[in-house]
Image: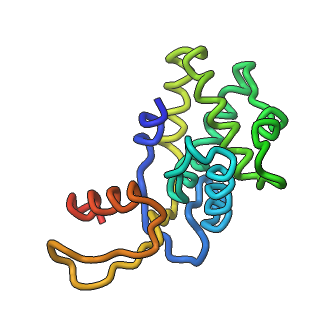
Amino acid sequence: LALALGGALTMSGCGTQADIAATVNGTVISESAARTAAEQIRQNYPEEAAQFGTGDAVGILINAPFVLDALAASGRPVSEESARAQLKLVDDPSPETITLVRYENAVGQLQEGGQELIDGILEKLRSAKITEEIINLATIRGVFSNRFQTTGLESMKGASDLALMLRSGSL
């Protein structure tokens, strides 16, 4: 289900302004806030979220308002208090970290809302205006060939995703 929601997004450009990871319907998601949230999620869930990176946080932060608003409108709100209660290993969780935990809790409730609720969320995601997105902050060293080196990636998953996008020609 989370993959289906993520698949509904399309990028409409590459970010060029410093610290902007995405702008969704006029709301800016900063790269630094997403990085902090990813760090706090890894801190709170060291085993389950060991590979959770900034890009993962950005993707969820893009989806979260649509999912949380739809659940609230259907009478199934996901509270900030319940998210804070789950963040036992983080002293001062950022608002973005709280949103990530709320989203995770919400995804479990989506099935209960039925296909109509999910379809409504997907439709809103498809029509969302996403004006900028930084996929990652990798630095590619050397000439593109069969072998080159990247730095600045947070995980092997991020490296694999970047390699796949480069091979497919989507970057």
Residue at the far bottom in the pictured view: 142
Residue 89 vs residue 149: left or right? right
Residue 146 vs residue 75: left or right? left
**x and y, in percent, of residue 55 in the image:** 50, 57
Question: With respect to residue 147, does 158 lie above or below?
Answer: above
Residue 12 vs residue 41: left or right? left
**x and y, in percent, of residue 143 in the image:** 22, 84
Please give the count of numbered marks on the rendered protein.
0
Q: Residue at x 64, y 37 (%)?
A: 103
Quadrant hosting residue 164: bottom left
Quadrant hosting residue 35: bottom right
Identify the image quadrant of the C terminus: bottom left
**x and y, in percent, of residue 101 in the image:** 68, 40
Residue 12 vs residue 91: left or right? left
Question: With respect to residue 24, does 68 lie above or below?
Answer: above
Q: Residue at x 60, y 16 (%)?
A: 113
Quadrant hosting residue 36: bottom right
**x and y, in percent, of residue 48 in the image:** 55, 41
Front one among 148 and 76: 148
Q: Residue at x 76, y 43 (%)?
A: 87
Residue at the far front in the pictured view: 47
Front one among 116 and 56: 56
